[in-house]
Amino acid sequence: MKILLIAVGKTELSSVSKLCEDYFTRIKRYINFEFKIIKDIKTTAKTKEIIQKKLEGEKILAELSPSDFVIVLDEKAKEFTSREFSLFIEKQMNISTKNLVFVIGGAFGFSQEVYDRANFKISLSQMTFSHQIIRLIFAEQLYRAFTIINNDPYHHD
């Protein structure tokens, strides 16, 4: 299985980028992993939110293959504990999911077309985080999931 994490817009905080890269390197010890940034849409004060989501959505959809299992990160979706998330990942591995794609939207979230394409939605919290910080939180949780799956000493119940 391959995991692809797609995020809209680059991380402007170098400290967050460095921490993300550290977790991405750790994740690659366990699985084929790729991180892809979708260039964000430059907007003006007059650009409507729906237009921005539509344009970003088109870029996201262009990165997907028909066989990808797509999961969007959305605060109004299903929440997991870390152990439940690891079981979810392990299940995808066991059913031979070829490409597991997680998507982090831009500042306004996703277009309806992206939601329609998604196979599943996951929430990391009911709280709202910046689309830059959520990358780090998700990367840590993905790494944690693989340490749980592999019985490595990182997660403590």
Image (cartoon, helix red, strand yellow):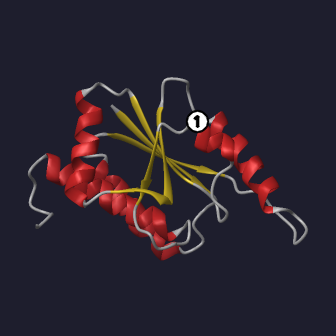
With respect to residue 123, does 95 lie above or below? above
- Residue 69 pos. (x, y %): 45, 33
Left or right of 36: which side holds 153?
left
Left or right of 144: which side holds 12?
right
Residue at the image point whose x is 27% and y is 26% from the top: 95
Q: What's the amino acid at mark 1?
A: Arg
Q: Give the farthest residue toward the right.
A: 46
Instruction: Identify which residue, 106 or 113, lies in the foreground.
Output: 113
Left or right of 117: which side holds 82?
left
Q: Quadrant of the C terminus?
A: bottom left
Q: Quadrant of the N terminus?
A: top left
- The residue at which mark 1 appears reads as 117
Residue at the image point whose x is 10% and y is 54% from the top: 152
- Residue 8 pos. (x, y %): 62, 55
With respect to residue 36, does 81 lie above or below? below
Residue 81 in view (yes/no): yes
Residue at the image point whose x is 8% and y is 51% from the top: 151
Instruction: Identify which residue, 39 or 14, lies in the foreground.
Output: 39
- Residue 103 pos. (x, y %): 52, 49
| Circle 1 crowding by C-alpha within 10 Å: few under 14, some 14–19, many from 20 | some
Left or right of 6: which side holds 82?
left
Residue 30 in view (yes/no): no
User: In the structure shown, which secondary structural element does the residue marked by tag 1 occupy?
Assistant: helix
- Residue 125 pos. (x, y %): 41, 68
